[in-house]
Image: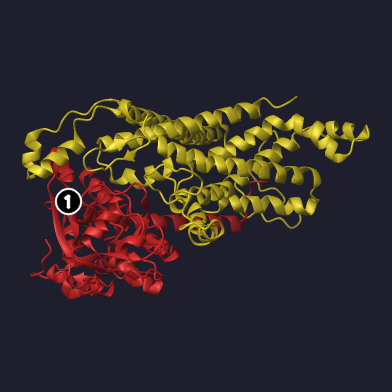
Amino acid sequence: MLSAEPSLAPPEPAEGVRLSAWRPPVSDAERARRDRRMRALVTAGASLVGLTLAALLIVLTVKGLSALWPIAPVDPALLREAGLNAEESARAAAALGGWEGLSAGLLRSARWAPQAIDTPSFGALGLMRSTALTTGLAALIAAPVGVAVAIYLSAFARPMERAWARPAIELLAALPSVLLGLIGVSLLGPALARLFDLPSGLVALNGGLLLALMALPTVIAVAWEALNAVPSTFTEASLALGADRVTTLWRVTLPAAWRGLVAASLLGLGRALGETMAVLMACGNSEAPPSSLMSPAHAMTATLALELPGALRDSAHQRALFALGLMLLTISLTNQLVARRLLRQRAP
Amino acid sequence: MLFVPSPRGVRLRGLSLCALALILGLGCASGRPLRVQGSESELELISGLAERFAAAHPGVGVALSGGGSAAGVTSLIDGAVDVATVSRPLLPTERVEAARRGVRLEATPFALDTICVVVNPQNPVAALDLDQLGEIFRGETTRWEALGGEGPISLYGRPSSSGTWSLLRERIVQGDYTPSIRALGGSAAVVQAVAADAHGLGYAALSYVRHAGDSVRVLGLVVRPGEAPVDPRDEAAAREGRYPLTRALSLVTLAEPRPEVAALVAFSRSDAGLAMIERAGLFALEADDAQR
């Protein structure tokens, strides 16, 4: 590509090509300098991402674990300085200090009442049940539907349909979650209320359906890729042996792609697990733990979004919320790791 | 050949660089923006106020966010915002926290607001007394039959970070809310949910109820047995303190704020500020109002 002797004259432009911005070639030293500069810039960008991630994990872990340590009682001098009367002092002292740590509550109680007047309680079981209910429903719907769509697209769709499907799926993935929440509040909610004769459509079912919609693009995209990764020789051999397409699908393609399909469902579940705005708007957020899909739910993510901004720094409430965040992180990281592992161990 | 830039490419790149410089320049020209956070009930009023303020003070930008009164005060104590908009008195916990961190908070009330109790228009109940309301929110009354209606009561409210939530608890509930009450993001969401639920009952800030028109019905509150119910939209009742859920909306800053912050607080009490308050359907605060 390079001539041995760099010419300083502009090359003859080919027919129809304009070379108004042509510059003479640069020296080797200058080129090396440019490369170094660019590499430093790119490396800085990459390490920024790594450092941010590490800092995030460390802060979340430290703050989340701080929920386990006790908080000392409030200094009475502070209560006097704040100019509180006897009753206010008692309440402030109860809310801010003398906390024995979370070991007594988080995983054993279902009563989440962080601002209760006399006995604040930080039991996360109800919140976990809410999250399990909404994301579980989402995964139960999105996994079979998403895999079915992926099978159709990879095995049966016409090229024209495939060409349309990809942008359509991307569009669904790009829908802002607040918009889906709005749909949940103003369309899906009233429809569910009428259908099941509920007083209000702001229930776990509403959130679960929205989450299914949000998980669907992830499931379809990953499952589609997994199916496409099955070597065409497999299917061709099966068809050549006289099997029909459905038999080929059940006996050859799906067994070869199952890891990818399970990973697709897990990644879809992960998408639903972290979603906040839609469940916050559509589920009603009652402190009472949900008894069924038809009762309001208070997902862990929605709790964090609603309560974290107003929780005083280092208060029991804030520590409990960070512990909740740490739990959410652990669940979703585990889920992600399992899915990645499945994707790496593809069938030969 | 591949990387030879065409004149068009050069021009595009130049244009985008100019645009970037312009955006950065605009960002810097307005200096550090005033950061305001807090009450969802005040959000609409404050955003109107902030817009007017920014128009009257070129070079000063205002960044506004919600999250509830508690979010505003927490951020103010943390030094993350300049002004907290608060729809209730400062809580004992917040005063202790401020003392612990060595900051002094200064609240400037600027408007009168009322918390409205709303039901679905299909609901025959026209008024409740304060005891009945307390029983409903504590979960002791769970059906409308006891109050002259029918069916189960479904309750809509706000999260604990909301000033409306804590003021209603202080004045009416005087205990813990029933855990079955739904906590929605803002007054507008509460009004919308009650409008869709024939058995619903919720509480919301006055300006959002005014927007709702006939989609919900505002309940009058009977303060003492035998008296006529008081309507939250009645200006005289709010001013004289006859409506029990009347509150002052205030701007809270650190003591001795920087000049732009003080200017914003002063602006909220100027004639232009008063006009915005009236336009939002709230009441401007006057010297002889019964509210603190």
Q: Nearer the viewer, residue B202 or A49?
A: B202
- The x and y percentages for residue A309 are 31, 46
Residue in the image at 15% along x and 30% along y: A73
Q: Secondary structure at mark 1?
A: loop
User: Which chain is indicated by disc 1?
Assistant: B
Applied colour scheme: by chain
As displayed, is residue A139 above or below residue A185? above
- The x and y percentages for residue A110 are 38, 36
Evaluate whether residue A161 shows in this view.
yes
Q: Quadrant of the C terminus of chain A?
A: top right
Quadrant of the rendered image containing residue A27:
top right
Q: Residues within 10 Å of mark 1 (few under 14, many from 20)?
A: some
Chain B colour is red
Q: Nearer the viewer, residue B98 or A20?
A: B98
Residue in the image at 65% along x and 27% along y: A344
Residue in the image at 29% along x and 40% along y: A114
Q: Quadrant of the N terminus of chain A?
A: top right
On the image, numbered disc 1 is attached to which residue? B90
Q: How many marks?
A: 1
Residue in the image at 36% along x and 51% along y: B181
Q: Nearer the viewer, residue B139 or B252?
A: B139
Q: Which chain is yellow?
A: A
- The x and y percentages for residue A292 are 49, 44
- The x and y percentages for residue B257 are 15, 53
